[in-house]
Image (tube, rainbow, N blue to C red):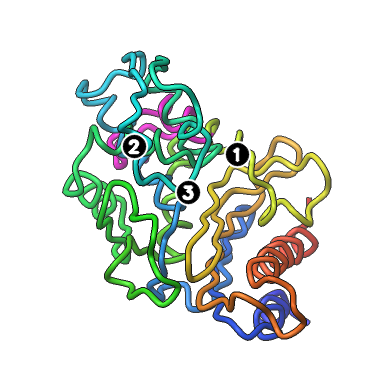
Amino acid sequence: MGLQDRLDQICATQPFATSFHVRDLATGAVYARDADGIRPSASTRKISIMMAALRAVHQGRLDLAEPVTVTAEMSEGVASGTFQYMTPGFVITLRDAIVQMIIMSDNVCTGIVAGRLTLDELNDFCGKAGMTGTTHRFIVPPPDMPPDHRLDEVTTTTPADQGCLLAQILAGCGDAEVAARLGCTPELCQLGLQFLSWQKYRTMIPSQLPAGTKVAHKTGTGRRGRMDAGIVYRDTTPRFIIAVYTDQVPTTMPDGLPGYAAAFLVIGALARACWEAFSP
């Protein structure tokens, strides 16, 4: 059985929609399932927020060393992360806010970072990066979205868009022309990739890979499903890009398990199948 058939078979075993974009970095081969289908982005949107912020750093409009005081007001309506539980008044840098936005999906920090940009800037960045299926619709998402919310009520993206952005960040680490297309430098692309590699949530792409496998990725927790997009390494070599989005995941599966657990298993199984198919 070829890899495409194996990946499709994994998706077909579940009663919810799964779409993916996989790129073999050794050969350039792409494997896809509804990769241009519009999906809720959840926190995978934060990859483009990070890169748009790094673009603004390169433009001299933002300073990574800027001190930011975390106030009680910043925690209002926040549904993810740890800063909402901390005593207000502490100071972090903008750099550290970006780190927390990525590795812990902290939405206090997302508000800090994205609040220094505009929705027009975020969508301009995505457009120039070729992410034609991605639309940012808010800075911090409303905390009480129903599971059956419409797509136009949230930020949306596609697996292909996320795969495209990750490929450009990776290439931009060593190619100034590619980095410039993102409005960045190779050093800023390297910084963004480093932040993604510090991701602390490992229940999806890394979950079925060998212990300690390096994955530079950003997870998402949506009301309609779970998603993850990242670059998987073998030792220190980037081996493949994978972006997976599950949608219309039931709260409870027929066997009684939570729907999100099934979504985790599918995303992990897809990454494992790619790991086994792509030679070192």
| Residue lying at 34% horizontally and 37% vertically, measured from the top left | 177
Closer to us: 239 or 209: 209
Q: Which mark is residue 166?
A: 3
Closer to us: 68 or 172: 68
Kind of element beneath mark 2: helix
Q: Where, by quadrant of the figure, is residue 61 drawn?
A: top left
Query: Which of labels 2 and 1 is toward the front?
Result: 1
Work out which residue is located at the far right of the displayed protein and give it: 210
Closer to us: 185 or 97: 97
Please say whether residue 82 is visible from this viewpoint: yes
Of pointers 3 and 2, the one earlier in the residue sequence: 3
Q: CA distance from mark 3 to mark 2?
A: 16 Å
| Residue lying at 58% horizontally and 55% vertically, measured from the top left | 241
C-beta proximity under 8 Å, tags 1 and 3: no
Residue 170 drawn above or below residue 70: below
Kind of element beneath mark 3: helix
Query: Which of labels 1 and 3 is toward the front?
Result: 1
Mark 2 is on which residue type?
Glu
| Residue lying at 33% horizontally and 72% vertically, measured from the top left | 151
Mark 1 is on which residue type?
Gln
- Badge 2: few (under 14), some or many (20 or more) residues near its Cα, within 10 Å? some
Query: Which of labels 3 and 2 is toward the front?
Result: 3
Percent position (x, y) of residue 186? 42, 29
Left or right: 20, with 6 as reference point: left
Of pointers 2 and 1, the one earlier in the residue sequence: 2
Q: Which residues are magenta?
A: 175-193
Closer to us: 207 or 107: 107
| Residue lying at 70% horizontally and 35% vertically, measured from the top left | 236
Q: Which mark is residue 177?
A: 2
Mark 3 is on which residue type?
Leu
Kind of element beneath mark 1: loop
Mark 1 highlights which residue? 199
